[in-house]
Image (cartoon, helix red, strand yellow):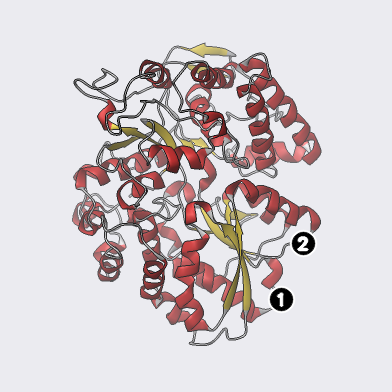
Amino acid sequence: MVRGKMSRRNVLKGAASAGALAAMGGAVPAFAGSHSSLRAEILKVPGVGMGSPTDADWQKVGGMCLGPTKERVAEGEFEGVELTFMGLNNQNLHNFLFRGFLKPWEAYTGAKINWIDLAQADYNPRLQQAIATGTVDFDIIEMGAPFEGDTAGKGLLDEMPDWVKDQIEADDLVGYLQPPVGTWDGKSYRITIDGDCHTFSYRKDYFGEGSVTGRANPPKTWQEVNQISKDVAGKEDPLTGLPAHGYLDPLKGWGGFGFYFLENRAAAYAKHPNDPAWLFDPDTMKPRVNNPAWVQAIQDVMDLIATDGAYPTDQINADPGTTGFQQFLAGTGSMLMWWGDIGSNARTSDTSVVGDVVGFGMNPGSDRVYNSISGAWEDTYNEAPNMAYLGWGVYVTKRVSGDEKKRKAAWSAAAHLGGKDISLWMSAYPSGFQPYRNSHFQYDEWEAAGYDRAFIEDYLGSNADSYNHPNAAIEPRIPGIFQYYSVAEDELAKGYAGQYGSAQETADAIAAAWEKITDQIGRDSQIKLYKASLGL
């Protein structure tokens, strides 16, 4: 469905059933076939509106989804095998779920998994240290596609066996996550477990007749986002009675991942529809991060910092985890860009109080866009969803390549986590992941699980519209990308704290640091890989 460029605007609301999809020439997803009974059953664990899932729920779902493993692995086949898995422990999700999902797999196969748990801010330094020192101490890694240049490009990953592609039904991935994502030099390395685009979440109770904003509709542009944020400063939040706030910018770094949140603003200004590049000039790798579009994005944030009450107190120490989970879901603030799992958390997490008042959309646009080729602003509306991070995946390292039993065990564990059915559960419940397969966009499944139809059309629609947008800002898979992002966070923090005299000075400092990184890695090779990532 999504690969066919069918967005919410022109198809989804009228094509909820498999029959309607078939009538339009699309493939009928697994929901209509043999998977349907299992998918319906796992979505009842624990049930939408029944509170946050627990380890018992993760283990139950993991056990219910062992069918594909049992078709390919004999009971006890991996007895004596020990594997080390490195991943995240964010918000008690990611690795915590994987532990539960894999306990039934361990019990059936006889293998044992040891865990390396990392906070988001520690992830890039830990991975880069292992790469730089040649001390890769993990067999399986949860990793995003941007790191494929640092790992697959250096020969550190094990190539995916064909049987794994069959088990995970890889052709079900939405179009923008199909190869070349997950591949390097034509070889496949990645089991996708996430979609990762940033979508816009907003509080519907901040808009409408008599609302605190006085506006009938949520903002369409970043210019409106900033104006609303200034207008509500000093007013009262309609849900909590606490101070009202507009948009929640994370002002503290997050190991490079926080840079995506400035990208959201910048994409609308900087990603011109006629130019695939927006981070660097593709012919020279000269940074564009200090051009007028990026400077405007930085200035937007600085303007809100300077507006008393626009941000919650101590926002300078709020990272993206804080804005998403401790602020927005908990009732502080009215607008947020975040990965799509905010949507599932809104209705299925004990920490959320906004489930009944949250709405979704794409990244706001801009009423003007900067043309890097001509060097001038164009007064035309522009929108550019940020395909931030290309989703998490599970990869297997070369540590297992010389031991066929261990290699099969590692890929079997990874394939279990990337299975078609278990992925639906992870998209519908708090997991750290968002919809990323064509088969995830079946409204009937979500509604049968307990989701309100209008809510799920809005939530899934915001993801589908973003995935399919013709001017999406795509993540480049080049070596060192998180070196660029991490140093940008460092310079932004200085700018937000007033250590630079202006947004332009802040942007110039980022650009200078990026030039040094490019020269260290090798400009010619970076140009070649950056062009390839843009399809040039």
Q: Circle 1 sits on which residue?
A: 402
Q: Horizontal and vertical percent for residue 131?
A: 74, 55
Tell me, yes or no, if residue 274 can be seen here.
Answer: no
Displayed quadrant of residue 161:
bottom right
- Disc 1 secondary structure class: loop
Three-letter amino acid code at disc 2? Answer: Thr
Displayed quadrant of residue 80:
bottom right
Neighbour tally class for label 1: few under 14, some 14-19, many 20 plus, Cα within 10 Å: few
Looking at the rendered image, the disc whose residue lies closer to the viewer, 2 or 1, is 2
Three-letter amino acid code at disc 1? Answer: Gly
Q: Which numbered tag is attached to residue 39?
A: none
Q: Horizontal and vertical percent for residue 63?
A: 39, 75
- Give the left or right position of residue 470, taking residue 525 as reference: left
Q: Circle 2 sits on which residue?
A: 135
Q: Residue at x 45, y 28 (%)?
A: 312
In the displayed image of the protein, which residue is found farthest to the front? 241
In what quadrant of the picture does the C terminus appear? Answer: top right
Between 98 and 179, the one lying in front of the other is 98
Q: Horizontal and vertical percent for residue 267?
A: 50, 28
Q: Is residue 308 above or below residue 242?
A: above
- Give the left or right position of residue 60, taking residue 308 as reference: left
